[in-house]
Amino acid sequence: MSTGWHTFATIDPFNGMTAGKPGQLANLVGGEWQAPASTRDDIVDPLNGEAFLLVPDTDDIEPFLAGLATCPKSGLHNPLKNTERYVHLGGVCAGAAALLATPDVESYFTRLTQRVMPKSWQQCLNEVIVTRVFLENFAGDGVRFLGRGFSNPGDHTGQESRGYRWPFGPVAVIAPFNFPLEIPALQTLGALFMGNRPLVKVDSKVSAVYEQFLRMLIHCGLSPNDIDLIHCRGEKMGELISAATGQLRLVQFTGSSSVAERVAKTMNGKVRLEDAGFDWKIIGPDFDPDWVDYVAWQCDEDAYNASGQKCSAQSILFVHDNWTDALLPKLAELAARRNLSDLTIGPVLSWTNEQIKAHIDAVIGVPGTELLFGGKPLTGHSIPVEFGAYEPTAVRAPLAALCGEHFELLTTELFGPFQVIVTYGGDDVDTVLALLERISHHLTAAVVSADVQFQNRVLSSTVNGTTYCGMRARTTGAPRC
Amino acid sequence: MSTGWHTFATIDPFNGMTAGKPGQLANLVGGEWQAPASTRDDIVDPLNGEAFLLVPDTDDIEPFLAGLATCPKSGLHNPLKNTERYVHLGGVCAGAAALLATPDVESYFTRLTQRVMPKSWQQCLNEVIVTRVFLENFAGDGVRFLGRGFSNPGDHTGQESRGYRWPFGPVAVIAPFNFPLEIPALQTLGALFMGNRPLVKVDSKVSAVYEQFLRMLIHCGLSPNDIDLIHCRGEKMGELISAATGQLRLVQFTGSSSVAERVAKTMNGKVRLEDAGFDWKIIGPDFDPDWVDYVAWQCDEDAYNASGQKCSAQSILFVHDNWTDALLPKLAELAARRNLSDLTIGPVLSWTNEQIKAHIDAVIGVPGTELLFGGKPLTGHSIPVEFGAYEPTAVRAPLAALCGEHFELLTTELFGPFQVIVTYGGDDVDTVLALLERISHHLTAAVVSADVQFQNRVLSSTVNGTTYCGMRARTTGAPRC
Amino acid sequence: MSTGWHTFATIDPFNGMTAGKPGQLANLVGGEWQAPASTRDDIVDPLNGEAFLLVPDTDDIEPFLAGLATCPKSGLHNPLKNTERYVHLGGVCAGAAALLATPDVESYFTRLTQRVMPKSWQQCLNEVIVTRVFLENFAGDGVRFLGRGFSNPGDHTGQESRGYRWPFGPVAVIAPFNFPLEIPALQTLGALFMGNRPLVKVDSKVSAVYEQFLRMLIHCGLSPNDIDLIHCRGEKMGELISAATGQLRLVQFTGSSSVAERVAKTMNGKVRLEDAGFDWKIIGPDFDPDWVDYVAWQCDEDAYNASGQKCSAQSILFVHDNWTDALLPKLAELAARRNLSDLTIGPVLSWTNEQIKAHIDAVIGVPGTELLFGGKPLTGHSIPVEFGAYEPTAVRAPLAALCGEHFELLTTELFGPFQVIVTYGGDDVDTVLALLERISHHLTAAVVSADVQFQNRVLSSTVNGTTYCGMRARTTGAPRC
Amino acid sequence: MSTGWHTFATIDPFNGMTAGKPGQLANLVGGEWQAPASTRDDIVDPLNGEAFLLVPDTDDIEPFLAGLATCPKSGLHNPLKNTERYVHLGGVCAGAAALLATPDVESYFTRLTQRVMPKSWQQCLNEVIVTRVFLENFAGDGVRFLGRGFSNPGDHTGQESRGYRWPFGPVAVIAPFNFPLEIPALQTLGALFMGNRPLVKVDSKVSAVYEQFLRMLIHCGLSPNDIDLIHCRGEKMGELISAATGQLRLVQFTGSSSVAERVAKTMNGKVRLEDAGFDWKIIGPDFDPDWVDYVAWQCDEDAYNASGQKCSAQSILFVHDNWTDALLPKLAELAARRNLSDLTIGPVLSWTNEQIKAHIDAVIGVPGTELLFGGKPLTGHSIPVEFGAYEPTAVRAPLAALCGEHFELLTTELFGPFQVIVTYGGDDVDTVLALLERISHHLTAAVVSADVQFQNRVLSSTVNGTTYCGMRARTTGAPRC
């Protein structure tokens, strides 16, 4: 297998994708790449508003409904059917992982990701690395072993209970804009491994990345008939799902809570959702001057990387009084170092400046709050107005304010570079724990402390998808289990 | 521990529960047994319509909302909190299992079950045995081991990924009438084991059984504060759930599809449903005269035990032509032996005779169908009119009829002693498989065949919760995994 | 099932087992209980030297060789053969656990154990409890689930890799004197569960207990053909093994290292050994006055319970200087409270006073050592001279002495109430760790500290079967996994 | 990473390794490649007896003893120590797998293997593929996940049972000649993954392959300090083990039974052995003409690939009478097609022609036996006399002869191209099963039948490491679990 990205990719993020030579995207359906006549005119370069991609504005959903119909409920394969596909997909993973490990292809996907979702090189590179390691994890016999079943001796000789991992069959994967590669790559591969045939839609602002990734998988041996990819508007996808409720066995949706609820209703509960998280970090009483720099750095990373556009971004920070004086000034310093030139701060793709300002104003309107830093739009750039562009911002709020009528406002997620900071004292731990209990969307959390008693007190009383614990605790990251 | 049922039970199904001395039921809430002033007048003895139980018609839901509020999202216990409760609950299981193993208590629950849900002694006894074995499975360290977590080495020394089994916290369990003991017992214990605090509602027609079971658990050491039990109408429970959506983290619902959908919408998808199954059995081409009697017997059991009121009951039977002549007459013979005196046929608690007749008439109206046996109401009994009482019934339908416009009608579940029988030939297997693919509610299924090729053809192409396979294949049963 | 011990037991430890009416033991072979003509005259009451048991002095091994021959390598059952036995054995466990939970039977086995292996009531009761919980753990489907297998999808449709848990077939279990019930009970049941047919030999001084336990299992439904029990001298058992090397597929041996090595050689490695452990406890630098009493109590328990006759007994104690002054005097106090009347100190069944004295003298002869307490034979008793009877004894040795030529002597296990105590300073941790690395028999260990850094330093650098960690750390106990 | 074998390898099997330019091998010890002064003169090209490799005749074992001493019992890493090594080793696997997947490196190792262990290209290639897939299986997080531990809730809050996968520390791996790459590669990598530091010795006739593989691993990032490699004679390795019994925690030995027993004695049982297997295949009664060609082909592969030098090679074939006439002639035909030119038959490295002839003569001497084919030395070659060179040979023996005094002789493994064939009738199945029970070395077996009853009869009554079952059943192969 040749190892350059030119062997499979159709878009050049280094020299191409300019207004003069925009990249042409295409749907994959029925095993064929097809570029519909109609192209969206609202997809623009997030850094300058210029045209840079020709994204299909797909209108005809019939071919995709037909695609779903090609896969039975028992899947393209299962432990009793077409089992050679498990090993074959393991081989595709091995090949794709090796390709992603080459500097050429690694930087290709990093750069392409950065072009559509402007964040720092490291943040984009992390997506490529996570995706590569995921592929490595399922290389060889990895897919086959994921299909592991079990048996138990039965009541009588000749009888045996067997359990098999069975596919859903035709499924849909709907992926958001903030992780253009990692989220759709991992979700669709996981679906494929176990015999499902996914219909994939990625936010059209960034779907170029996944399309190129899919072309790479096909280059590595994946059958183009195993998956359908549609570039279309959200409303059209909603229409497609509504038309396919009888066929779709599951929809994996990642995105906003409101759309998530709509999909859940349409699908009558046959969904897997990953929506918002109002992620908290609590810094415990055991102040340690040796750790201040590290903790401050991690807070800055958690709150403002990708301009806060992570579902795992730190939304609220509880700081014990012992840390306040040392820590808060450092947060301001670190935030001030972020800039557009290296995209450590960048466009906000789902909130406009107007919306951001309105929310910050409301928060600052709460008695006792204080703007710690930020709070102003970015200047000196050409980010188009349909996107936000705001300084990393933190508002300090009194604990009492959170406990009262402003709880809802202060725990509303702004999907951008914004966090609320609350300080607390030794007697306030129960109050803080009661607040954490009230928060409705638990995704990630962090307990920054080396005090085993304090750790246990918080850990045993809270509920999160992932809780990071220890002096290095963070809200963002990717634990592997 | 004393071993007689008198030590814990408040109702006597052997001599009591008559009109003269009806059994008084009570709610458990806040650790106290409370019998509300108001009692339902519509709960009657299903065999003669007489009053036999005083079931609370609970109206005030406040105490139950308060009960939910006593349990945080992190549960009554979790692997980091109150871990002594794991071992304690294992001890409760050991004690309760030993008690259920005594002939006195075993027959008590068998008889009580039969009084409220009239089915054969063996069917009722099976519930007690399944419940006892479940308790044995979690005796000793069983609960603790269910709380098993894992760890993976982290990226750096001192770092480790840990996975713990965490509770949901406050949950609800809503159980139906057809398995008065087994379903609520297993579901609430499972919830308790992992730290949840369940609010339990069982269909008021049969909730007496679970109440007595709960009294036995408390006798064996369960804290009465660990669980709340409400006797109330379905509408009241709906009201309670609506009022508690912010608190309830999960609802486990077993019952009809229509109510299930309503609960799912209220809870925004935070439900575990076990609703209908239109369960099929297919008898393969490898006719074996030595097996005819067994297969016929199993078909009769699957279709008509508990008068067909099992979600695993055989709803449709596909018979290969090689078996038709030998098998069908035997099915009629076996059905004819069922009678009210031993409750091998009995009241149908959720369909009236009128409704049953209407469905059978509609099915018989399909061209080409034939009433094989049954089809008439039972006579010579005092079952009240609000319940059904019908002969075991089978209608033979042509395969072609199923494939056409009558598919919906012929695959509608009648939760009573009714099945559809279809014969097919060697060339029809793909047609049959296509029908199975169209059925929407997959729960159990059976492939009656010793032909490995045929088994694999069917198994690899279908989707069910449990598929039984082999000459002894059945649709009803309890595989243990 | 009747619940008194009279229903199954043949020996009465409360009133019987005296010189006038000694209990008669019997072999179980070929499904029959048989008392050979010849009886050992050297088995005497360990507290007064009187005859109290008639233990067969079995000479004829032919019936036992024949017993081994009845079981093929594929076992009495396996996941493809006689699978009803899994469920049956689960039922035996449920019944036996329920019986052991009755006060009558619980005290019976506690008392019987105490009669043959004199240790405190609590120590004997613990054996009964551990055994009962083990039975509970395998009640119901527990045995079946232990036979769980797995499957992986194969390279081609129709192909599948399956893994099954297979028995060894004919095996032997050889158990020591110190845990008359727990060790042979758990080991033989585990062997039985998975389809093996064990030939069991327990040290004849205490084999009465296991024989009665086996009678109870048979009372609860175990087939007497599933197991053979032989009462005989060690030399005879060696002869039996030598004659059966071609048949025996595994020998589980618990006992002294020297015999273990001999068995290993005879069986060419087909053995599972649990021999000696020179178990260490290290008390870390984080002295906490609130914990001194607890730590001292646990040290006393670990060193002297069962008069030190546990393979998990604390053999050497490393005490950080921060603890020395507070802890050492308390150890002496606690040891002084032990007395013969409640058997908190009692006979030593495998070392005579002469041997004990010789070892202590040798240790004390090492320059720098100091006798902290004990060091004298017990007085005022009638324990026969073939057994030891010694005060709880501790010798303090300088760390330097351990590092030098006396390492072997100071790390030799005395299977009685004796321990070595070493104090160390903050700079000595590496020296201590190097010593732990040199010890050859690792079984249990304890790290008494709440300091995470210290814990990790020790835990990451050492190797033990079980390491207990934390302020409550102990060397004796039974973690359940 | 550059992708050619020239980047890491020191030997050229395509053009080099001739008498004029023999390849120089070296030991790896203390992180350095060292070629001792002394070289063996008895390692010759197995096809022509010429010198082709300079293999160290290592005499000084001190550096290797020192190497063992660098690794503590707690290993180079464990879940609490140096955990970054898990991920690092996963990365080494990913890189090495990608390299082995390149045609250049794949053919390099295939060719090198064939030069030292002459067998067909496909047989050699299989080793490379198996090794590559193994590397893929542990790429990414694979090593880390192999270090997975568990936790169980403890008796009290704050208490928890944790189980970790711990290393042995310093270990040795001794590998044979027949799989020069696969066996030492998989065994040493598995040891490395879990924190052990292996000292490796491969049969000096073939150790060139593993040395080059190790160089490739180091090229991919493995630390040369993680492993020591010694080229030496067997006696020297025995001396090394004897000198290191106090340090070595485990020896993994693959090779002959006699050496295995010696190692086991030296190490007092601390060994993992993979020695001989007398592997049987039984062809069931369900003759199927469509399968004759396949079954015959598989029999030929199982018996004669690698000239029978596999521990999984078919040593005895039981053929049901229904198959005899059709199958036996085909076996002769297939054997006749094997030839030296493509190495489908080749030198036998551990038996001389003299030894082979003596064994065949003895077998043929048994009354009733018949030489089916083969039985003569190969001619027209330059294989040196210290190696065997024999035609694929089969001797038919009567079932009765196996049951009697000749059992030992007829079930003695000849590690070369030789098998015994026995035919049996329907009444003989129990006799055959009794024979299988008597065989002492169970490794692989095959049940060639599609008859479920027959399969179960054999499978449930026999014991093997791996049993292949079905019409495609084989004795050689590599199931992945």
Image: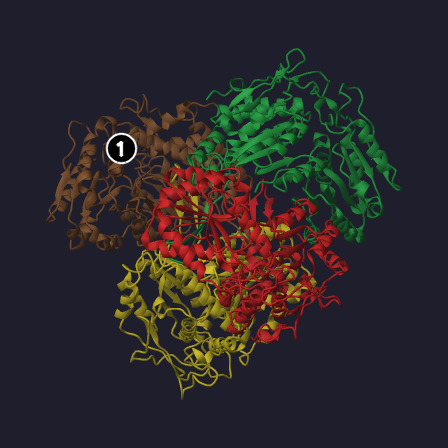
Chain colours: A yellow, B brown, C green, D red
Q: Is residue D201 above or below residue B324?
A: below
Nearer-the-camera pick, B219 or A53:
A53
Residue A361 screen position, x and y as percent: 48, 70
Q: Which residue is depicted at the point 29% across and 80% down?
A: A37
Local packing at callout 1 (Cα closer than 10 Å; few below 14, some 14-19, many 20+) is some
Locate residue B368 relative to residue D153 in the image: left or right: left
For residue C128, side relative to residue D287 (left or right): right
Please count the marks in the image.
1
- Visible residue check, residue D450: no
Q: As displayed, is residue D231 above or below residue D475? A: below
- Where the N terminus of chain D falls, by quadrant? bottom right
Q: Position of residue B385 (x, y in %)?
A: 18, 33
Residue D144 in the image: x percent, y percent?
A: 57, 58
Query: Residue at image x 67%, y 46%?
Result: C464
Q: Position of residue C260 (x, y in %)?
A: 68, 37
Q: Looking at the image, can residue D382 be seen? A: yes
Relative to the observer, which residue lies in front, D158 or C247? C247
Write the residue at 39% across / 32% down: B129
Residue at the spot x=67%, y=37% of the render?
Answer: C476
Chain for disc number 1: B
* Element carrying mark 1: loop
- D103 left or right of A233 in image: right
Three-letter amino acid code of the residue under disc 1: Ile
Answer left or right for A162 relative to D375. left
Residue B57 versus residue D60: which sits nearer the camera?
A: D60
Looking at this view, name the residue that lies furthest to the right: C367
Residue bearing mark 1: B43
Q: Residue furthest bottom?
A: A20
Closest to the observer: B100 or D289?
Answer: D289
Which image quadrant is residue B232 in? Answer: top left
